[in-house]
């Protein structure tokens, strides 16, 4: 192929090609892509070689920035890692790398963003800066997955950085931490974080209205400031529910049931949010009375919750829990709401229910339903317990794994050979998870 024909195919003029070939000028990312196109090879064909090109003349972020962004788009994380390794010791690049990380985070290119956040964190680890805290926050969010124990580890690593964040991010950081600790039943921790959320939200909210202007910290919150006050009360009612102190839980219900006494906003959004919390308050009042042993309330609770399809699954879980505790028969309710038992996404005015909490609730639901059916000698009981164990293993929920394995062993004589084989297979997976935890502990202590 002649130089002129290649120029036509690539769209680069012959003079530029000649200077590139003679090493007289660096190659831009756009020229690299044009050359690859002209040669009929994949866009990232020369990426590994281009890493060296980025440093061949002088270090130029004008070349490095578009190369990192394109590498992220094409999932060439190896090239990003090589670039970052060369820049690692220079604080001068931290600002631009952080800005790129934020751009990638917004584009949902989370794996690439994580590499940049880690690099900036490493460079600034002794700086105690707000940017370091933000990197740790983003890494915490990126690290959230189905594995509850992994989520817990990332939460523990991130928590010391919360108070270094810009004020506008602190409330949502606390909310995300609360969700992690709720999923693993660390209720004392949840309560402490909810109290901190309430304190900060109240300060920010009062400051906003005293100054009669929109404070900068609200610019970053996912929801209006007053929502975090209501949510903190909701979380604290849940904590006391888990403690079995339903009287105290109802005290917090009365706080988030109605915000008219102090809420200064009177727009459509605030009305929707107040309505959502009011619905939760009514449902939870039924719930706490039921969990206290009031059998006559169960069908009233079912009738109320039937108007809110996204709340039915969680209500069913608690109804089964109460039925097991007090030996009630709720077959009619289970039949009535049978279509709501599969796992799916549930939406509220505060956003989707946290996926990790829903997954954990579903694992508990399966084991509780299995226990309910065992008491009635029903054939599907052992399969429900195995489904619960399978889900518990998937999300690495220690508490639910122990519950399901204990139930299966207790009623092993009711299991057929197929169920016993499945239990054996899942037990091996549990052993693998435990071995992985032991390796983590050995490497960190």
Image (spheres, helix red, strand yellow):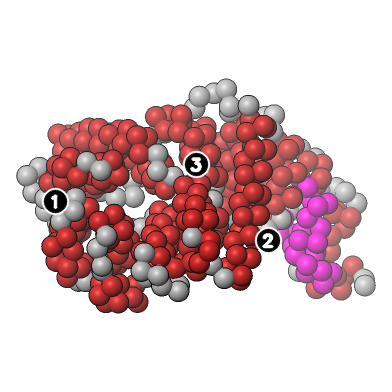
Q: Quick one: which residue is furthest to the right in this view?
A: 1
Task: Nearest to the eye among marks 2 and 3: give it.
Answer: 3
Image x and y of residue 75, in percent: 68, 58
Give residue 18's mark.
none
Q: CA distance from mark 2 to mark 3?
A: 31 Å
- Few, some or many C-alpha atoms within 10 Å of disc 1 (few <14, some 14-19, many ≥20)? many
Q: Secondary structure at mark 3?
A: helix
Q: Is residue 109 left or right of residue 234?
A: right
Residue in view at x 27 percent, y 60 percent: 327
Residue in view at x 82 percent, y 69 percent: 41
Give residue 257's mark.
1
Q: CA distance from mark 3 to mark 1?
A: 31 Å
Q: Nearer the viewer, residue 20 or 383?
A: 383
Q: Secondary structure at mark 2?
A: loop
Q: Is residue 230 visible?
A: yes
Q: Nearer the viewer, residue 269 or 39?
A: 269
Image x and y of residue 100, in percent: 57, 46
Q: Secondary structure at mark 1?
A: helix
From the viewer's perspective, is residue 366 above or below residue 26?
Answer: below
Name the residue that disc number 3 marks. Answer: 152
Hey, which quadrant is residue 362 in on the image?
Answer: bottom left
From the viewer's perspective, is residue 113 above or below residue 303?
Answer: above
Q: Is residue 274 left or right of residue 73?
A: left
The part of the chain drawn in magenta is 29-51
Instruction: Assess whether mark 3 and mark 2 are in contact (beta carbons under 8 angstroms).
Output: no
From the viewer's perspective, is residue 344 above or below residue 392?
Answer: below
Q: Main secondary structure of the magenta part?
A: helix
Q: Quick one: which residue is furthest to the top in this view?
A: 126
């Amino acid at each position: 192929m002649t130089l002129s024909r290649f120029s036509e195919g690539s769209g680069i003029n012959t003079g530029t090609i000649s200077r590139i070939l003679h090493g007289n000028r660096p190659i831009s990312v756009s020229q690299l892509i044009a050359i690859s196109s002209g040669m009929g090879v994949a866009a990232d064909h020369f990426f590994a070689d281009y890493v060296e090109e980025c440093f061949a003349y002088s270090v130029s972020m004008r070349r490095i920035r578009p190369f990192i962004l394109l590498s992220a788009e094409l999932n060439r994380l190896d090239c990003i890692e090589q670039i970052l390794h060369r820049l690692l010791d220079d604080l001068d690049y931290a600002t631009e790398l952080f800005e790129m990380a934020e751009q990638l985070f917004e584009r949902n290119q989370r794996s690439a963003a994580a590499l940049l956040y880690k690099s900036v964190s490493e460079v600034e680890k002794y700086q105690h800066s707000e940017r370091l805290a933000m990197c740790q926050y983003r890494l915490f969010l990126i690290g959230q997955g189905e594995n509850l124990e992994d989520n817990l580890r990332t939460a523990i690593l991130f928590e010391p950085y919360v108070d270094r964040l810009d004020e506008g991010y602190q409330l949502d950081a606390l909310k995300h931490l609360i969700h992690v600790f709720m999923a693993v039943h660390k209720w004392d921790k949840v309560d402490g974080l909810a109290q901190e959320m309430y304190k900060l939200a109240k300060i920010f909210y009062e400051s906003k209205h005293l100054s009669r202007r929109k404070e900068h910290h609200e610019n970053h919150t996912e929801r209006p400031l007053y929502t975090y006050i209501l949510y903190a009360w909701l979380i604290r009612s849940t904590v006391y529910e888990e403690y079995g102190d339903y009287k105290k839980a109802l005290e917090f219900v009365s706080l988030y049931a109605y915000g008219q006494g102090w809420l200064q906003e009177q727009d459509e959004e605030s009305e929707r949010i107040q309505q959502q919390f009011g619905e939760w308050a009514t449902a939870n009042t039924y719930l706490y009375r039921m969990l206290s042993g009031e059998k006559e309330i169960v069908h009233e609770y079912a009738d109320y919750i039937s108007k809110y399809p996204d709340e039915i699954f969680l209500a069913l879980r608690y109804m089964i829990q109460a039925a097991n505790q007090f030996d009630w028969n709720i077959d009619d309710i289970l039949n009535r709401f049978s279509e709501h038992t599969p796992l799916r996404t549930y939406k509220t005015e505060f956003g989707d229910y946290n996926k990790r909490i829903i997954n954990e609730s579903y694992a508990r639901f399966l084991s509780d339903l299995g226990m309910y059916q065992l008491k009635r000698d029903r054939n599907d009981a052992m399969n429900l317990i195995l489904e619960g164990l399978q889900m518990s293993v998937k999300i690495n929920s220690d508490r639910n794994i122990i519950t399901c394995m204990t139930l299966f062993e207790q009623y092993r004589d009711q299991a057929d050979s197929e169920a016993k084989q499945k239990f054996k297979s899942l037990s091996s997976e549990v052993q693998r998870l435990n071995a992985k935890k032991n390796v983590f502990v050995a490497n960190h202590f």
